[in-house]
Amino acid sequence: MANLANNQQQSQPNKESALFPTYARYPLAFAKGQGSYLWDVNGKKYLDFMCGLAVTNLGHAPAAVADKLKQQLDELWHTSNLFQIPNQEKAAQLLTSMTSGDAVFFCNSGAEANEAAIKLARKYQQKVKGADRYEIITFTQSFHGRTLATLTATGQDKVKEGFHPLPAGFVTVALNDLEALQSAIGPHTAAVMLEMIQAEGGVYPAETEYVQAVAELCKQHGLLLIIDEIQTGMGRTGKLLSFEHYGIEPDIFTLAKGLASGFPVGAMVGKDYLKEAFTAGSHGSTFGGTPLATAAVIATLETMQEQNVIEHAAQMGDYLMQQLHDKLSGHSFVKEIRGKGLMIGMECAAPVNELIMAGQEKGLLFVNAGPNVIRLLPNLLITEQEIDQAVQILSEIIHEYAPVVSASGPSGV
Ligand SMILES: *Cc1c(COP(=O)(O)O)cnc(C)c1O
């Protein structure tokens, strides 16, 4: 199994494609999705344990969201943010009533939500506080998006390659190292931005004491605390927002992926006192918060409330973690199982791409987080039976592939 180390083997560029080859795509295309399942164009059925990377949190084509969208499609799609948008007001009311945030700016993606957060932090420090503060401190292995500012904020060199010069005013320090953060804070620091669980970076949770100390440091130094909840938010970790596990309240948090069940919507949510910094004309988005997009947000949030989705996600997260420990933690290939709720990472002894494709063969979809980590992100309405099915397939795959890996040793990255 020498090609286990070849993490790019699925990336044979399709010369016929008229797309830029920015993705190493698997040779699979889906035609239908319902609940926890997808069907490919040949009719083969797959149990989905990645959910478009934590997007389809209520499963595929959830009826309540679909109904609301169909109704809105017949009524009104788009006007302009120059007018009142009742759906946008209602979505913001719902979001702020369910969280510690007071005000919402809607956009269309995670990167835009983080971009808005960075702009708001600078504007607040400079215009409201009158301080020469602009620097944002972020963390190694973080992921915050692909725009120039958000890829600069991202603590991974691979996303920055070839895009220099990058915007100034970003500093990256190691996570869970308070001294490193302390020494990075200076007279120009405006904000600290982090994920509670680094998702793309390998499913690494921030430590509770550390996070509380970071929040305290921000208060002491007059810095804004920005939490990127784009992947961890919307119930994914067993709370609506992952920072609720840590007993802190950030000044700003950002959402996207699961916010509208797959309809593209991003949101930047902040405390009341930040409204002063984002006055008329200071920021905007043509498509941000359209009647159609915010209909999907409303239906998603209402469904989460009505069906106790978060409680269910927390229970199923415990169940999945338990099953993985029972069935797999004894295997030498599995080094560590970590995460919270329904965001779980299994650190393995070698690259896992071959296992991902073996999963696809057996009808189970999951993804990696870095070369050696299997990442499991089922929808939040997943059942015990579906979890059993997934763990069974994972167990088969690991038993079929892992001995070969162990024999040849970890193959490096
Ligand atoms: C996906 C993701 C983003 C970027 O979101 P896009 O919608 O792809 O721009 C930012 N931060 C985190 C933590 C993410 O997981």
Image: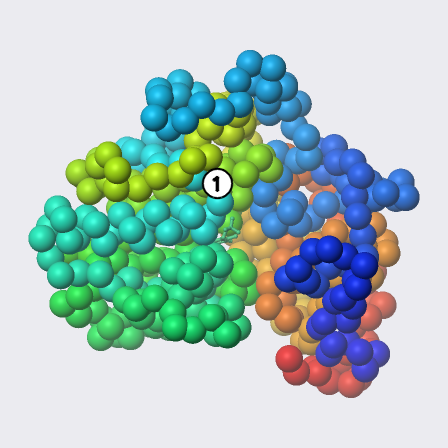
Question: How many marks are shown on the rendered structure?
Answer: 1
**Residue hosting label 1:** 108
Q: Is residue 124 left or right of residue 375?
A: left
Q: Residue at x 45, y 57 (%)?
A: 147
- Residue closest to the eye, 128 or 212: 128
* Amino acid type, residue under disc 1 in the picture: Asn
**Residue 387 figure quarter:** top right
| Residue 323 picture location, percent across and down | 68, 52
Whether the residue carrying mark 1 lies under 8 Å from ligand 1 is answered with: no
| Residue 160 picture location, percent across and down | 47, 71
Q: Residue at x 68, y 30 (%)?
A: 61
Q: Is residue 322 above or below residue 98?
A: below
| Residue 221 picture location, percent across and down | 15, 60
Q: Quadrant of the N terminus?
A: bottom right
Q: Is residue 77 left or right of residue 15?
A: left
| Residue 235 picture location, percent across and down | 50, 40
Residue furthest out toward the left: 130
Q: Quadrant of the C terminus?
A: bottom right
SS at badge 1: loop
Q: Is residue 156 above or below residue 241?
A: below
Q: Is residue 286 left or right of residue 20?
A: left
